[in-house]
Amino acid sequence: MKRLLVFIFAATLTHLHAQELNIVPQPAEINWPQTKGNNTITSNTPIVLAGSGLENSANFLNDYLQRFYGFKLKIIKGTNFKNAIVLNYERIEHEIPGAYIVNSYNGGIYIAGDNAEGVFYGVQTLLQLLPPADTKSPAAKIVLPWVNISDYPRFAYRGLHLDVGRHFMPVDFIKKYIDYIAQHKMNYFHWHLTEDQGWRIEIKKYPRLTQVGAYRYGTITGKKPGTGNTNTKHGGFYTQAQVKEIVAYAAKRYVTIIPEIELPGHSSAAIAAYPELSCFPKEPTVIPGGNGSIASKKAGGKLVQETWGVFEDVFCPTEYTFQFLQDVLDEVMTLFPSKYIHIGGDECPKEAWKRSAFCQQLIKEKGLKDEHELQSYFIQRIEKHINKKGRTIIGWDEILEGGLAPNALVMSWRGESGGIEAAKQNHQVIMTPGSHVYFDYAQSENEDSITISGYTPIEKVYAYEAIPAELPADKHHFVMGAQANVWTEYMTNPRKVEYMIFPRLAALSEVLWTPKEKRSWEAFEKKLPQLYKKYENNKINYSTAFYDIHSTTLKDTINNGLLWKLFTNATESKITYSTTKDTAISEYRSPLAIKNTQTIKAVVSVNGVVKQILLQSFTFNKATAQKITLANTPSKNYPGDGAFTLVNGIWNERGLQKRHEFLGFSGANLDATIEMSSLQTIKEVNVGILEAVNSWIYRPAAIEVYISADGSNYTLAGTANQFTMATPLRKVGVSFQPQQAKFIRVVVKNYGTIPAGNPGAGSPAWLFADEIEIN
Ligand code: ACM
């Protein structure tokens, strides 16, 4: 390795300058020389390769310059490197590949990496030092400041996932996606290639996988269970030639592609192609929810799924299936040089295996305890085959159930507990918890396109810490890093995928790369407007959720009403509002007094440009803004905005996306007492309830209403225990003879245990309430 003298600047300015550079992820060290100065890159500036094997990074730099500035540089080898961009190696010896330095100084630009990845990341940083390009009238020269940067990655695994099963994404977009990964100094692309709704990779030995399994007759419209069906064939697959091309494209960007072949669940598309893979080859596929396409009804038999979720028809653990999977994996391992092969393992219902005489016999023969151990047997057989080829399996955290395969790496997605458990068993783990890094969740509380559920704003992604707090220090080294997952049920095209990942990907990159002590939300937030400009220059579709108007409601003790408090994260923005009663527009300065039923329109703008609009309705009844106390505290994950949430006049309209509008109770009752300001005649009490069975959230078992004039002697006013839930969000309640009361106790009984055959069966049900109404 050739070593060069590096210019060291003894004196530096303060760290404050770091943000001005807008480098994402934030580098470990940025030092400014005492004397300010600039370097200029023109078409005469050479790129000098002072180390061997760095042509890749030089070409990458040139391609970028050509694309955005309209010129390329000469690439030369040698030692005369005044006023050049020099690429070289330096021994930094960071334990994770990718460390580098970038010195822009009065002799030119010097980029040196610990290894080839490091040089590549140095080039990525250089590109971010360049002023924004004007592609319409490219500048003949590019000016950048003198500065010293030294940088290294925090985690070895910095991943982004993409599900191409639910919606097929074209090759060009896959390449773009890999570019996005590399630009953020991330290094793994987890390519989820097989699903119930489509098999996406050509397997020569099993041509029906793509002839049949890559296409579905239609797709449900709207949010599951859907409002109908597109009745339009959807599908596509990657040929082996395309896969090779994509793998090579990624390798040039130091991105490793981990293919995922899902097993034993999420296998409807493979079963549609080869029904013998099912325990019940003759049983036709059911498309739950009643919104299957016309063509699928006509075709019958095994079908590629047209709706979302988890399906019972899974791979049967026969020798035929194992041979099939080994053949498939052999072709996959030939195409992908990755050390890691993802085999899925999540969400495999055991119903078919329970019904299957073959499976029950196999459980006996192998001395297994139950179907969970059968799944473990399944995974371990696959692991043995993959290990024989010198590769390692990765599985979702369900592979812990029934015993972890001996060499497996675990991806923790159902929170952090799977990752903690696997690390405690001395297995390497990758953290991908749904709570923080599922990029299919809405980033805006006011998102109006369909998203799967949940709400993960960029601040929450930024705050994510991949080493779980509960993990003992001697196990920290098992956490290789983290990954965001992008499931595409509600992303039908690349534009929507971009909208869901940007700008959260930028936040994730700092979580994964930047030293923990250098990570700062305040600094990151200041970089966002510049990032948005870059996205616009690159025609990237991104979310402006950062400008969301957030609100809380407080009790207005003076007016016996509500105070509505508004705020936004965007420091340079302005909020204005108007009401249905008075359409005049006023600037928001302090919480607004809300004394009766009305709708308020709040608008956030930056330099006169509208960024977000929020319409909020307030509905007043006898409970609104009254004193409320709770006998049981809600779950710490669903505290809403406290007990007052239930009397704040706001009925939830967007489900869990506005999760602070709900109080959530796991297995427990909601037991609230409302004290009205005076004795009043009442005849009805209603509660706003959310039901989302797939998220384990159920309607109440019963509601009991007790009333009192003095707050100590209560009588039962009425009960109800039958509720119709035509829509997931609904008022349910109790009516009774008009009576006088000042205190009303409302006991909303939890559903209890989740019934068999439903997600979470056997676990305590959740109860979610957003409002109490007294009439
Ligand atoms: C997953 O989200 N089912 C891994």
Image (cartoon, rainbow, N blue to C red):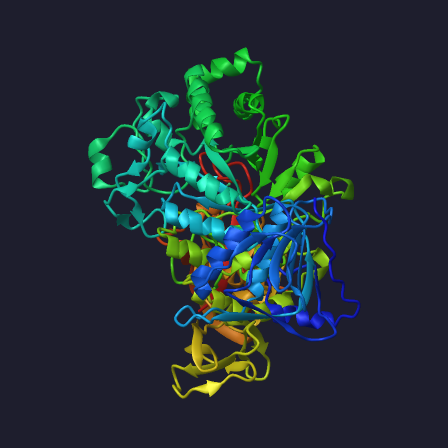
Left or right of residue 539, residue 771 in this image: right
Observer able to see residue 721: no
Q: Would you identify the image quadrant in which residue 446 lies?
A: bottom left
Q: Is residue 475 above or below residue 448?
A: above
Q: Is residue 355 above or below residue 656?
A: above
Name the residue located 25 percent from the left edge and 48 percent from the top edge: 230
Asked whether 741 or 516 is in front, the reply is 516
Q: Is residue 510 above or below residue 243?
A: below
Q: Quadrant of the C terminus?
A: bottom left
Q: Quadrant of the N terminus?
A: top right
Name the residue located 44 percent from the left edge and 15 percent from the top edge: 319
**x%, y% of residue 505?**
53, 56
Observer able to see residue 59: yes
**x%, y% of residue 120?**
58, 51
Q: Identify the residue at the far top of this view.
A: 365
Asked whether 452 or 324 is in front, the reply is 324
Q: Identify the residue at the far right of this view.
A: 10
User: What number of labels is visible?
Assistant: 0
Left or right of residue 543, residue 715 in this image: right
Left or right of residue 16, residue 411 in this image: left
**x%, y% of residue 674?**
57, 67
Left or right of residue 335, residue 236 in this image: left
**x%, y% of residue 733?**
44, 58
Asked whether 707 or 379 is in front, the reply is 379
Q: Is residue 386 above or below residue 515?
A: above
Name the residue located 71 percent from the left edge and 36 percent from the top edge: 424
